[in-house]
Image: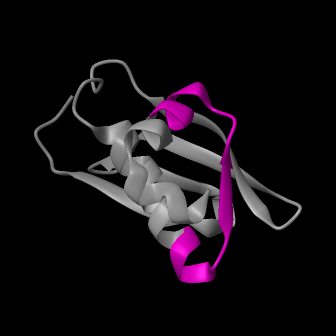
Amino acid sequence: MSSNEIIIRFEKQNNASRAYDGDRHIGECHFSLLEGRWVISRTDVDLGYEGRGIGRKLIHSVVENARLEGIKIFAMCPYAKSVFLKTPEYDDVL
């Protein structure tokens, strides 16, 4: 694990929001398009990067982009579900 700043990038072409430490891909919130909604299927962060809020930032990136595109989200991923339950300001995209 390096001391570079963690960068979160929304990569619509990859159906994901991804986290990078320098050039290294270290996490992802993956979604698919189903019936006009983005369905979050998984959120993963590499070992050694847990507990730093990266997963939450990945989900936030998906939420912000869903708002920009007027898309609703359904969370199948257990972690994403828990974030949505604890974050009422995301209710507008559910």
> Could you tell me if residue 62 is visible in this image?
no
Quadrant of the snapshot with the N terminus: top left
> Residue at 57% across / 69% down in the picture?
66
**Which quarter of the picture shows residue 76?**
top right
| x then y, percent, for residue 86 | 39, 38
Q: Residue at x 51, y 71 (%)?
A: 65
Location of residue 61 (image quadrant): bottom left
Does residue 31 appear to the left or right of 56 in the view shown?
Answer: right
Query: Looking at the image, what colour scheme do you see?
Result: one colour
- At x 24%, y 24%, the residue is 51
Residue 94, horizontal then vertical, whole percent: 62, 56
- Image quadrant assignment for residue 7: bottom left
Residue at the outermost top position: 47
How many numbered circles does the render carry? 0
Q: Is residue 86 above or below residue 63?
A: above
The answer to which of 2 and 5 lies nearer the viewer is: 5
In the image: residue 42, left or right of residue 55: right
As rendered, which of 4 and 78 lies closer to the eye?
78
92 shown above or below 51: below
Is 94 a magenta residue?
no
Q: Residue furthest right?
A: 35
Side (left or right) of 87 relative to 79 = left
Magenta-tinted stretch: 66-82
Q: Nearer the viewer, residue 72 or 38?
A: 72
Residue 5, how many percent across, how many down?
16, 51
- Whether residue 73 is in magenta: the answer is yes
Can I make out residue 72 in this image? yes
Identify the residue at the far left of this view: 3
Asked if 35 appears above or below 55 in the picture, the reply is below
Q: Residue at x 35, y 56 (%)?
A: 8
